[in-house]
Amino acid sequence: MYDRHLNKASTRCYLLPRAMASGTALVYDEEMTRYKLLWVDPACKVEVPERLTACVAALQEQGLAQRCVAPPVRPATEEDILLAHSEQYLEAVKRTPLMTLEELCPTQHTEVCHVTKPALAVWLQNIYHCAKLAIGATLQLVDRVMTGQVRNGMALVRPPGHHSQRSAANGFCVFNNVAIAALYAKKRFNIKRVLIVDWDVHHGQGLQYCFEEDPSVLYFSWHRYEHQSFWPNLRDSDYHSVGKGPGAGFNINLPWNQVGMDNSDYLSAFFHVLLPVAYEFNPELVLVSAGFDSGIGDPEGLMRATPDVFAHLTHLLTSLAGGKLCAVLEGGYNLTCLAQSVCQTVQTLLGDPAPRPSGLSGPCESALESIQCVRAVHRQYWGCLKHTERDLVSSPPLLLPLHPPAAGEGDGSSLGETQHRAQQQEGGGGDGLSPCLARLPPDRTQDRRRWRTGEGGGVLQALGHVRALLDKICRKEVQNGLAVVADVSVAVAYALQRAVTSLTNRVLLVFLGDGEVPVEVTEEGKVLVFQICSKEPRDRKSKYHIPVCLRKQGGDGAAGFLHAVLSLLLPLGYGYDPGLVLTAVGTESGVGQALWAQLTSLLQGLAQGHTLALMQQGCGEGTLRATACSLLGGPAPAVGPLGAPAPENVREVERQRERLQGQWGLLRTAGPAEGSSAAH
Ligand code: SS9
Ligand code: ZN
């Protein structure tokens, strides 16, 4: 088992609560390779047993399977199946093993791909057995995650499930594994909100039909649609299908009307549609209908997203539901892309940092149009999407000249002085926390103990710590670090200077608090400053300085803050692709510890997880602990139900997006200009 707890030698073990689930389950049984589909139509010959064996072989070869827990697979019971299917349908599927090959093979082969009830006959005898195992594997995973035996996991199953319906098989799918999992989790564990993310390239209409009237299950699907010309050619797959009755707003379809969608398109959909709504929904469990036919090279999808995008999609979802995420295989028909994408997903579930997200310039016009439509149609249901229409932006976009940061201030001598100051204050410390912690980089073969306290457990000088941490990050000895400092401004100035001279071309600084951000780097673009403040800062607004002024109103703090993080900071960060993320928080940040932990978690998707958190002494043990947990790869605690962000705060974020979206494409949520997007 992959042990992510603190090492025993550490004296600071209490940072991770014992109850916190750790570990990743990989649920698989070779038995599920033992059926074949008797397709005649060559388009249908892609759903082959090798899909599973290729994934398992790659996971083993990369040492990932060995790091996972492997619970045994059990067959589903009839009771499980009947959660989502009718008795007549179950009886019909049950009869298939008794049928002869002649009975199984219909004379007319042309319609076999989207098998409906009479055409059940095309399966080989063993498929009923395999379909029961596919459900059982999925439920086994749900059990392990919900009982806290593991944090998350993946089930490698076939047949897939998301197309199958109450009384119909469809598109290679027999029983709806993920639908059953959601219903099972609700019933068995009494949870009230389940999020299903269907990133398969096909629309999981079976999932939509199962939950469209149910507000307790939020279903999100993007899919190749091409204005209904792509299979399953349903009007129901368009963005207008938002759910019915009490379920209105809880079905989100994002149709892709062109092939060739890439990493920018997928991430934009997450930043501007899925994640804001998902945070507002506040799920207790995340189920992923993880089909990889949305990846590059797939003959079905014809999309262009690379396998590493799945690491990011996975990572971005692990900040929800306290990290409780179950990924369940659906489609994926290019064996190479499928296997690599599954590896990226599992590796991220294991907590390894995602590869750097490079070359993200922004979504294509067709993707933007889809994103704009789905946001518009869901605006009435979700607070995070309200007040985001362009005509609600009250003031014109700020178009300020680019100011190169002032040079020549804060040189080595002043640093020496503050170092001395820091030293004095550190000496008197003793809140029980080590001032310096670092997470070791992932290492698959040797020492699995991930944390070290500062050298010898002794108290070093704060800036010495900062330097030591940066050097270790630079030498790849540690992945990230946290330093408690006496003066966060001074530490930031020092760390920035050192990082851009010896570590990386680009540093993303996330600065929480009012006042001047101590950026003394002369070269424009080497530092991107994202400042969350409560007072309008003095100018210095360039492409690389983004102050977001949020006002706290009636408990809205969390919603406004998260909105800014999801719709501004993440797109900027992903577009900028820093080599290091520096976070800085002062004493009176006003941001709750859960939020800070969320932010820290989400930012781990950047810079291969190279983060240095600088925290002002006295910022509060809770905040410190939450940050440390997130840096360790622990799940960020759920922030609780979020209301709508205050209109004022949404408008502030919109203002910044208006100002910057010409230069940062990932900030866009709509076509080029008002009025001109009518023709298409
Ligand atoms: C009909 C093509 C149907 C079905 C693909 C199902 C994929 C499930 N000519 N293709 S993920
Ligand atoms: Zn598919």
Image: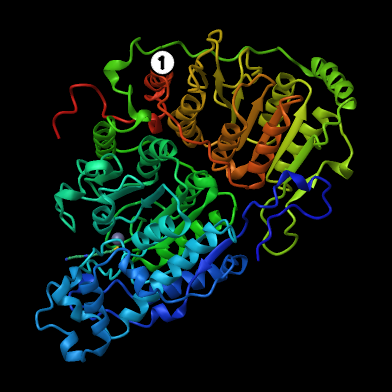
- Give me the residue at 84% from left, 53% from top: 9
- Three-letter amino acid code of the residue under disc 1: Glu
- Which residue is the site of mark 1? 648
Is 664 positioned to the left or the right of 43 in the image? right
Picture quadrant of residue 673: top left
Picture quadrant of residue 424: top right
- Give me the residue at 31% from left, 53% from top: 303
> Does 302 appear above or below 362?
below
Is 194 positioned to the left or the right of 558 in the image? left
Q: Observer-nearest residue: 141 or 521?
A: 141
Is 384 positioned to the left or the right of 444 in the image? left
> Does 61 appear above or below 328?
below
> In the rendering, at what x and y percent does residue 237 appear?
21, 49
Q: Observer-nearest residue: 668 or 143?
A: 143
> In the rendering, at what x and y percent does residue 590 appear?
61, 21
Determine if the C-beta at disc 1 is less than 8 A from ligand 2: no
- Give me the residue at 25% from left, 48% from top: 213
- The coloring applied to the image is rainbow
> In the rendering, at what x and y percent does residue 254 appear?
27, 44
Q: Residue 461: tell me if it is visible.
A: yes
> Does 415 appear above or below 95?
above
Q: Which image quarter has ligand 1? A: bottom left
> Does 313 appear above or below 102?
above
> In the rendering, at what x and y percent does residue 647 appear?
38, 18
Q: Residue 361: tell me if it is visible.
A: no
